[in-house]
Image (cartoon, grey):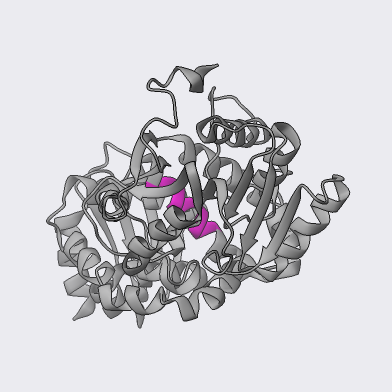
Amino acid sequence: MWIRLLDKLLVQFVKKGQLVVEYPHGKIIAYGQTLDKKIKVKINNPRILRRLVVSPDLTLGEAYMDGDLVIQNDDIFGFLVLITQNLTNQPDSWISRLLLFSNNSFLNSIKANAPSRSKSNVKHHYDLSPELYSLFLDVDKQYSCAYFKNVDDTLEQAQEQKKHHIAKKLSLHPGMTVLDIGSGWGGMAITLAKNYNVNVLGVTLSEEQQKISQQRAINEGLEGKVEFKLMDYREDLSVFDRIVSVGMFEHVGVPNYKEYFRTIKNKLSPGGVALVHTIGRITPPGGTSPWIKKYIFPGGYIPALSEMVAAVEKNYLYISDVEILRMHYAMTLAHWHQRFTENEERIKKIYDERFCRMWRYYLVASEISFRYYQQVVFQVQISKEQMTLPITRDYLLK
């Protein structure tokens, strides 16, 4: 029954490219056209057939991780491109409707992003082995979208450019105080203190990141200029001249957006400026991939610009600049995937084969979502007063 149903649905769905499926018990069926790239897959476990029909997003990822779905030559990139391109061309198809239904579990998003769960959500992802991240990130451990001035920039160049691009938007002056919300492994805070002579407090909920960041500051001789605390950004009552938040807003949760920007407003001094750098969607508000929520970012949500703007407006702050980075994260993820692949044998020794397949699926699916689907990066500059910043963007180009 489930083979017949899946067959019928795939006949309707695959219009671009060709997908050749070998079902359990040996039956082989080709879907789509041979004019484009051909992808061959084998379903080893008959028990996943029903789940592929009713929950395709979660099941595809799990089946790849467990070896229940085997892709010829392990071409996970080609397979997910084929799926994505057919999704894009057929927004009303069976799989599109199922993905929309499964991703729009709004009540689950509210629960997952409750403040009481923030620390456990962070620990799930960011307190993994430090060696893992050192094997695919740049030397500064920037775990967010880089900024490529040229397509042949190295990852290290692009990540440095990202930090300085953000620094220009903060309009820094020596002696200013800066709050870094979600400070990661400390690279942004250290760069701002070292290159712009400002005083930075970085806050994170990751114990591993806080320990590494603090030691980095000591090694750089920046004690007294940079401090990293293990705390929620809402706990510190200090006021700052500037606030920066890179790759953290995705973990805030929609019900907390108004509070997030209210906290920024309250923590900014008169004439204060904030820069929020976040993954965003080009579509109206939606949901989160069940697979991503279960295995990668519990409590994660990609905002629509309309959701961010509404929360800023309710706090009577000025949105002074918005920049949308389109292909930069796809290029960043391609670098991460290449480095991950080069170091995969070492990573298997830290974890195992299943973990590596999970992480590979995550990196490739993420790259494709930026390269071919509906994800971008928003850099939203916010000021507390109307005339704090220059009235043109020329200062960003100097």
Eyeballing the image, is 269 above or below 59?
above
Eyeballing the image, is 311 above or below 236?
above
The boundaries of the magenta stretch are 360-369
Which residue occupies the foreground of this view, 314 or 55?
314
Q: Is residue 72 visible?
A: yes
Name the dominant secondary structure of the magenta segment: helix
| Quarter residue 50 falls in | bottom left
State left or right for residue 250 relative to residue 359.
Answer: left
Q: Is residue 209 visible?
A: no
State left or right for residue 198 relative to residue 182.
Answer: right
Reply yes or no: does residue 202 show up in magenta: no
Eyeballing the image, is 146 above or below 119?
above
- The N terminus lies in quadrant: bottom left
| Quarter residue 173 falls in | top right
Eyeballing the image, is 275 above or below 152?
below
Where residue 98 sits: x, y (%)?
20, 68
Residue at position x 82%, y 46% in the image: 222
Which residue occupies the foreground of this view, 208 or 29?
208
Which residue occupies the foreground of this view, 53 or 339?
339
Where residue 284 sits: x, y (%)?
21, 52
Residue at position x 36%, y 67% in the image: 256
Residue at position x 54%, y 64% in the image: 233
Where residue 275 sits: x, y (%)?
48, 43
Number of numbered discs = 0
